Amino acid sequence: MNKSFRTDILPPQERAEYWTDAVHQAFTRFEIRPHEQDAVRGSLWLASVGALHVGHVEASPQRMARTRGTIANDSGSALLVSLQEAGSSVVAQDGHETLLTPGELVMVDTRRPFVRDFPGSFRQNVAAIPLELLDVPDSLLARVVGHAYQPTHYIGGILSSFVNRLAAAAESNTCLAGTNHYLERGIIDVLTAFVSHEGLLNADVTPTAEETLRLLIRDYILAHLNRPELSPGAIAAAHHISVRYLHKLFQGEDMTVSRWIHHQRLKACREELARHDLAGLTVETIAQRWGFASPAHFSRIFRAAYGITPVAWRRMAAA
C-alpha cells in the first residue's frame, strides 16, 4: 500500500500537527520543531513492503527528537535506515554525533533517545525495519547506530540501492503487490549482513570467545529450525557445552534460547503463510513444518504474537 502526505494542501496553522502525525504514521513518533518562523513544509511518499515502511521525504529545516517521553508513548521499535539525498543533517545517539552529507547512510535505534537536526531544506530516503525481524544481537547493533557510512561501502552500497529504489517506487506510486515478501526478505538479509559485518569491525576489542559462540549457536538454530527435536539440550550437545552454560551465554540477550527458537519458528510460519507459492499448503501443514504439533496451540500463540489469527493473516497477505 502506498500513501502520500503534503503540508501545502493545508492552512499554515494546521501543518505542524499534520506533519508530526504523518512522520509518526510512516516511521515512528518524534517531537518536531521547525527552525524557521514559518510553518513547517514537507512532503512524504510511503510504501509498505511487508512489515517494513520505506519512504521519500522532502521538507524544510527542522529538528526531530526521539525523547524518553515519546518512546514511553510509542510501543513500536524499529531500526531507521536513512540516506541523505540533498542537504545535510546531524544525527546524535548513544554519544555518537555524526554529520551526514548527500549520499551517506546512517542508522538509529528507536528504542533509545536520539536527535536528528536538519539545518536546511533536505531530501532523504528512509526505511523503518521492525527490530523483531532482525537476527542480530543488540551488542552488534549498538556499534553501528549513529555512524555515517559512505555509498562506496560494499554492503552499504547494496543497502543504499535497495532503500533508494523502494523509496522511488513509493514516490512514483508503483505497486509492489505480489513481490512484498521477497523484497522484505531481501532488505532484511542485506541489513543483517551489514550490521553483523560492521558491528564486528567497530568493536573496540576482538570479539570474545563467548560472542563468537553465541553467533555460531544462532546460525545453528536457524539451520535446524524445522527439526522438532531442536531444544536447548540438543543445541548444547552439538556445541559440546552444558545446558547451564548455554543459558548463561544468553543471559544478557533480550530472549532466552527457548524463546528465541520459538520466536524464529513463529516468524518462519508468518513468512510462509504470506507466500503465494505455498497457498496450496494448509495452515496446519505449515505449522507442523516448523515444529508446532497442535493447530489450536499454534493459532493461539500466533495471535498473541501478531494480534491476528494465522488464517486472517494469510487472507490479508493474499489480498
Image (cartoon, rainbow, N blue to C red):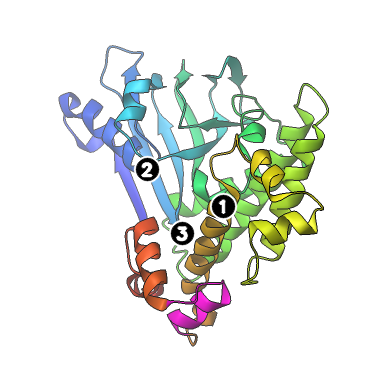
Q: Which segment did they paint magenta?
A: 282-294
Mark with earlier residue (2, 3): 2
* Real-space Cα separation, disc 2 to disc 1, in angstroms: 28 Å
Which mark's residue is nearer the viewer, 1 or 3? 1
Query: Circle 3: is it few (<14), some (14-19), or many (20+) Cα within 10 Å?
Result: some
Mark with earlier residue (1, 3): 3
Q: Relative to residue 164, is residue 19 drawn left or right?
A: left
Residue type beneath disc 2: Ala
Residue highlighted by disc 2: 26
* Real-space Cα separation, disc 1 to disc 3, in angstroms: 22 Å
Give me the residue at 44% from left, 52% from top: 170
Which mark's residue is nearer the viewer, 2 or 1? 1
Q: Quadrant of residue 25?
A: top left
Residue highlighted by disc 3: 50
Residue type beneath disc 3: Gly
* Picture coordinates of residue 221, whole percent (x, y): 68, 58
Circle on res. 6: none
Q: Nearer the viewer, residue 272 or 137?
A: 137
Q: Nearer the viewer, residue 26 or 205?
A: 205
Give me the residue at 71% from left, 36% from top: 151
Above or below, 180 against 120 in this view is below
Q: Is residue 153 visible?
A: no
* Picture coordinates of residue 272, whole percent (x, y): 52, 72
Q: Relative to residue 191, is residue 19 drawn left or right?
A: left
* Picture coordinates of residue 300, whole percent (x, y): 35, 66
* Real-space Cα separation, disc 2 to disc 3, in angstroms: 14 Å
For label 2, the SS is helix
Residue type beneath disc 1: Trp
User: Is residue 104 located in the magenta-colored stretch of the structure?
Assistant: no
Placement of the C terminus among the 4 image quadrants: bottom left
Above or below, 214 against 38 in this view is below
